[in-house]
Image: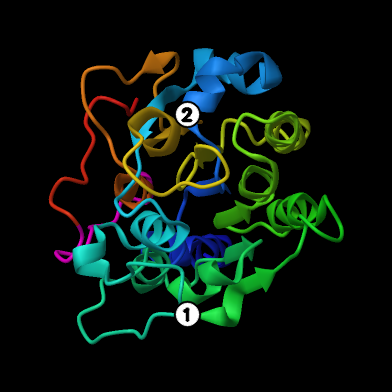
C-alpha cells in the first residue's frame, strides 16, 4: 500500500496535467535566410545532414512587414501583426486583446512546467513580457558562445520548453551584407550551434525524448530586410526533428508561415490553441 501511494504521488503531476511529458527546444536564428541556405548549403553541412531525419523546408514564409518585431511576435503569439499588434521593433504596449504567447498557453495548461527563454535581443523580452524565466545574453558582441552555453545549461536543468534566440546572422547581415563573407561565417556558426546542441542531447541519450525546432524571423538583401524581395528576404528555414515528427519529410506542397510555429509546439504538448491565434496555423502530415 505504501509503495502504491509513493508511485501515485510521483505520477500525480503528470496524471493531472500539471507537468508535461514532452520536451521541446526552439532554436531561433535571427536573420537566417532560407534563400541563403539553399545557395550556400555547403556552409552548413551538419544542418543539411539533419534533413534526412526531420520535417524541413527552406521556404517557410515570414510575415509582412519583414522586421524582427512582427515576426518574432508571430512566432511567439501565433498570428499576424494585425492581430498581435506588433508592427515594428519598438516596445509595444500590451493591449487587452493581445493574443496569449505560447509560454502563457503552456503555463495555463501545465502549471508546473519548467521553461527557459534565452534572448540575444531585448525585443524578445518585450514581446514575451513575463521576465520570470527570461535571460538576456549578448553573444554577438561579448561572449560569442553565451547563448549556446546557456542553452546547454537549460537542457541540463531539465526544462520542458527552451526557446533560444541567436542574433549573430542578423548582426553580420546588417554590418556586412547578406551573402557577404562575414554572413557566410555566421552561417557556419549557426551550423556549429545546431551540431553542438544535437551532440549534447545525443550524449545524454535524449534525442528520442526531445523535439527540436529550428527557424528564423527573416532573411535579407544587401544590408537590410525590408521590402518585398520574396526569396532573399521572405524565405526562412524550418526544421522539426525528434520523436513527434516524421523523418526525411520535405514540405513542398503547401505554403507555411512562421506564425504557425507555436501551433506546432502546442500540438506537440497536446494543448489547445487560443481562438485569437490564426485559424491557418495547423499543419497536417508532419507528425509521426
Quadrant into which the C terminus falls: top left
Residue at (60, 55) in percent of width and height: 165
Asked whether the beta carbons under mark 1 and mark 2 sit within 8 Å of each other, the answer is no
Secondary structure character of the magenta stretch overall: loop
276 vs 243, left or right, is: left
Q: Bounds of the magenta span? A: 268-277
> How far apart, in angstroms, are the residues tagged by discs 1 and 2?
29 Å
Which callout, 1 or 2, points to the residue nearer the camera? 2
Q: Residue beneath label 2, please?
A: 34
Q: Position of residue 286 (x, y in %)?
A: 31, 27
Q: Is residue 148 above or below residue 90?
A: above
How many marks are shown on the rendered structure? 2
Q: Residue beneath label 1, please?
A: 129
Inspect the magenta stretch and tell me whether residue 270 lies in it. yes
- Mark linked to residue 68: none
Q: Secondary structure at mark 2?
A: helix
Q: Position of residue 49 (x, y in %)?
A: 61, 14
Q: From where the camera sits, is residue 243 visible?
A: no
Residue at (70, 29) in percent of width and height: 184
Question: Which is nearer the eye, 59 or 135?
Answer: 59
Question: Which is nearer the eye, 58 or 197?
Answer: 58
Question: Which is nearer the eye, 104 or 119?
Answer: 119
Q: Secondary structure at mark 1?
A: loop
Q: Is residue 226 above or below residue 124?
A: above
* Label 2 CA crowd tier, 10 Å (few <14, some 14–19, many 20+): many
Q: Position of residue 231 (x, y in %)?
A: 38, 28
Amino acid at each position: 500500500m505504501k509503495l502504491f501511494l509513493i508511485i501515485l504521488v510521483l505520477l500525480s503531476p503528470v496524471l493531472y496535467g500539471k507537468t508535461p511529458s514532452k520536451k521541446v527546444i526552439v532554436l531561433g536564428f535571427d536573420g537566417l535566410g532560407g534563400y541563403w541556405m539553399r545557395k550556400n548549403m555547403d556552409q552548413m553541412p551538419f544542418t543539411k545532414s539533419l534533413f534526412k531525419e526531420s520535417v524541413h523546408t527552406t521556404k517557410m514564409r515570414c510575415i509582412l512587414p519583414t522586421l524582427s518585431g512582427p515576426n518574432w511576435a508571430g512566432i511567439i503569439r501565433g498570428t499576424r501583426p494585425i492581430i498581435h499588434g506588433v508592427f515594428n521593433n519598438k516596445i509595444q504596449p500590451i493591449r487587452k486583446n493581445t493574443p496569449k504567447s505560447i509560454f502563457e498557453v503552456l503555463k495555463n495548461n501545465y502549471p508546473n512546467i519548467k521553461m527557459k527563454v534565452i534572448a540575444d535581443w531585448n525585443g524578445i523580452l518585450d514581446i514575451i513580457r513575463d521576465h520570470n524565466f527570461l535571460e538576456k545574453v549578448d553573444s554577438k558582441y561579448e561572449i560569442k558562445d553565451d547563448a549556446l552555453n546557456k542553452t546547454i545549461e537549460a537542457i541540463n536543468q531539465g526544462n520542458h520548453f527552451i526557446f533560444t534566440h541567436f542574433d549573430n546572422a542578423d548582426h553580420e547581415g546588417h554590418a556586412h551584407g547578406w551573402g557577404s563573407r562575414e554572413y557566410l561565417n555566421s552561417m557556419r556558426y549557426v551550423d556549429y550551434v545546431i551540431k553542438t546542441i544535437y551532440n549534447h542531447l545525443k550524449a545524454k541519450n535524449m534525442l528520442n525524448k526531445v523535439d527540436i525546432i529550428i527557424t528564423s524571423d527573416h532573411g535579407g538583401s544587401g544590408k537590410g530586410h525590408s521590402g518585398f524581395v520574396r526569396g532573399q528576404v521572405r524565405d526562412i528555414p524550418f526544421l522539426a526533428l525528434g520523436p513527434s515528427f516524421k523523418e526525411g519529410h520535405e514540405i513542398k506542397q503547401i505554403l507555411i508561415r512562421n506564425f504557425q510555429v507555436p501551433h506546432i509546439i502546442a500540438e506537440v504538448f497536446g494543448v489547445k490553441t487560443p481562438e485569437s491565434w490564426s485559424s491557418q496555423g495547423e499543419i497536417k502530415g508532419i507528425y509521426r
